[in-house]
């Protein structure tokens, strides 16, 4: 299938090239530049799908915005990049179908135009839930604007429907439209319930209220809504605030993701292991569910570094980490540091667990040479009890020590009396 293309239409070659350079640095999608209407015609006739188009309004062979009309006729998501644009123009019938406008009035506009195109490229993967109890013309306008920007939109008439869906799904944004139609108790309970589940960085919410309901909007913000805009907003204001709130939340999620991971192996790090492990330990103890703790250490790893170099040592660590993650994909797997790893999981069957440990040990023993170019073995210490997570880890570590002492490349289980 042909990859969709970013289309840049501008008769100023230097600007078109700057846009292309900036886009190329930030996306792998193909980019096509056209300087005239006839070039745009030929490109569209070639049948190449266009992801997003950025288009200047006046070209030498199309001085009256004919390119824009052509792109919109072909249902192509289009951003207007023009030196002359004002609010009056925005209300013209044709411009209502434009996804966004970027004013070509300073060098920073290049960056912003590219940013806008990349966002429109990402938006089909962003979910927006709209709570609109009165289904007014205004809510229809909101929905149309969201579609123009290619967001995935789901509309809800009842707070209870949002609650139900949140049990299994999570959107990127919840928009609450004209909430004065909802019973205040129900409204604030919904906001409260959402905030119990997700903080304002994890799931942003925005309220859209008529200016006469500003007090309600402010109260909603106090209870956990991130931002508010009044119903007389311009499309630009709406888009820019929506984008900023979503991007802020995405950056937060990215930082949260990185803070939990070990940068070499991408396994969870020790800090997250204890955070999540403590919660699981309490849950399983309360429910009297059996669990296991497994410590794994690469044998004679110092020799690997000394003989093959630190970089090869890193490759071996990554290889063992990936094998471990594959064998224990349903469990909490972490790199504890150096060449040591830990797994914490629910125990379904002793035999199955022992079989899984043995399969991992054997795979590394027999396949490491082919995978990383040198033979590697691991030792494993297993414990299926413990008064606390730390106690369980200590017991597994003792078993690992026994495995090392008794010849390495083996699994040792701790006895319950220790
Ligand atoms: N390449 C690499 N080496 C690391 C990393 N972290 C720790 N090490 C090295 O891992 C080695 C661990 O060695 P030791 O604790 O002596 O254990 P060992 O050689 O594996 O011996 P046994 O565990 O007794 O089988 C040290 O040489 C550390 O420098 C890392 O991120 N990358």
Image (cartoon, rainbow, N blue to C red):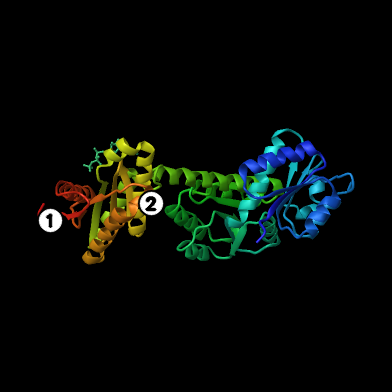
Residue 178 position within the rendered picture, expressed as x and y whole percent measured from the top left: 62, 56
Question: Residue at left 54%, top 61%?
Answer: 183
**Residue 415 bears which disc, if any?**
1
Residue 331 position within the rendered picture, expressed as x and y whole percent measured from the top left: 33, 57
**Residue 403 bears which disc, if any?**
none
Residue depth check, mark 2 versus mark 1: number of the one nearer the observer? 2
Does 140 appear above or below 265? below
- Image quarter for ligand 1 equals top left
**Residue 371 bears which disc, if any?**
2
Do we see residue 221 in this rendering? yes
Question: Residue at left 34%, top 51%?
Answer: 368
Q: Quadrant of the N terminus?
A: bottom right
* Relative side of 139 to 103, left or right: left
* Relative side of 391 to 132, left or right: left
Q: Quadrant of residue 109?
A: top right
Between residue 351 and residue 359, name the one nearer to us: 359
Q: Quadrant of residue 144?
A: bottom right
Between residue 13 and residue 219, name the one nearer to us: 13
Check whether the beta carbons of the residues at disc 2 and disc 1 lie within 8 A of each other. no
| SS at mark 2 in the image | helix
């Amino acid at each position: 299938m042909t990859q969709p293309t970013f289309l840049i239409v501008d008769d100023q070659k230097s600007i078109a090239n700057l846009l292309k350079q900036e886009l190329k640095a930030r996306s792998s999608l193909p980019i096509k530049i056209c300087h005239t209407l006839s070039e745009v015609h030929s490109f569209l006739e070639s049948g190449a799908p266009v992801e997003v188009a950025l288009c200047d309004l006046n070209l030498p062979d199309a001085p009256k915005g004919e390119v824009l009309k052509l792109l919109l006729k072909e249902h192509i998501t289009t951003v207007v990049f023009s030196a002359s644009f004002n609010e009056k123009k925005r209300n013209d019938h044709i411009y209502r179908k434009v996804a966004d406008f970027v004013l070509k009035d300073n060098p920073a506009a290049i960056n912003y135009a590219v940013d806008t195109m990349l966002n429109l490229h990402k938006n089909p993967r962003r979910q927006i839930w709209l709570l609109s109890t009165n289904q007014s013309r205004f809510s229809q306008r909101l929905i149309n604007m969201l579609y123009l920007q290619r967001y995935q939109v789901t509309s809800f008439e009842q707070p209870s429907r949002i609650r139900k869906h949140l049990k299994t799904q999570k959107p990127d944004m919840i928009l609450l439209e004209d909430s004065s139609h909802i019973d205040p108790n129900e409204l604030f309970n919904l906001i409260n319930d959402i905030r119990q589940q997700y903080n304002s960085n994890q799931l942003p919410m925005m309220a859209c209220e008529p200016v006469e309901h500003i007090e309600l909007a402010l109260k909603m913000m106090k209870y956990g809504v991130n931002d508010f805009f009044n119903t007389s907003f311009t499309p630009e204001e709406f888009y820019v605030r929506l984008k900023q709130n979503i991007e802020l939340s995405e950056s937060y999620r990215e930082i949260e993701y990185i803070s939990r991971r070990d940068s070499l192996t991408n396994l969870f790090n020790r800090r997250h292991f204890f955070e999540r492990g403590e919660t699981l330990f309490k849950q399983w103890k309360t429910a009297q569910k059996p669990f296991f703790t497994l410590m794994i250490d690469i044998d004679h790893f110092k020799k690997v570094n000394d003989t093959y170099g630190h970089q090869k040592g890193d490759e071996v660590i990554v290889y063992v980490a990936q094998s471990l993650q594959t064998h224990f994909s349903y469990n909490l797997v972490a790199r504890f540091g150096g060449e040591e790893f830990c797994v914490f999981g629910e125990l379904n069957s002793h035999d199955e667990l022992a079989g899984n440990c043995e399969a991992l040990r054997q795979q590394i023993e027999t396949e490491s040479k082919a995978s990383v170019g040198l033979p590697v073995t691991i030792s494993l210490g297993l414990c299926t009890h413990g008064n606390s997570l730390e106690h369980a880890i200590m017991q597994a570590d003792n078993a690992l020590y026994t495995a090392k002492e008794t010849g390495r490349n083996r699994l040792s289980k701790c006895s319950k009396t220790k």
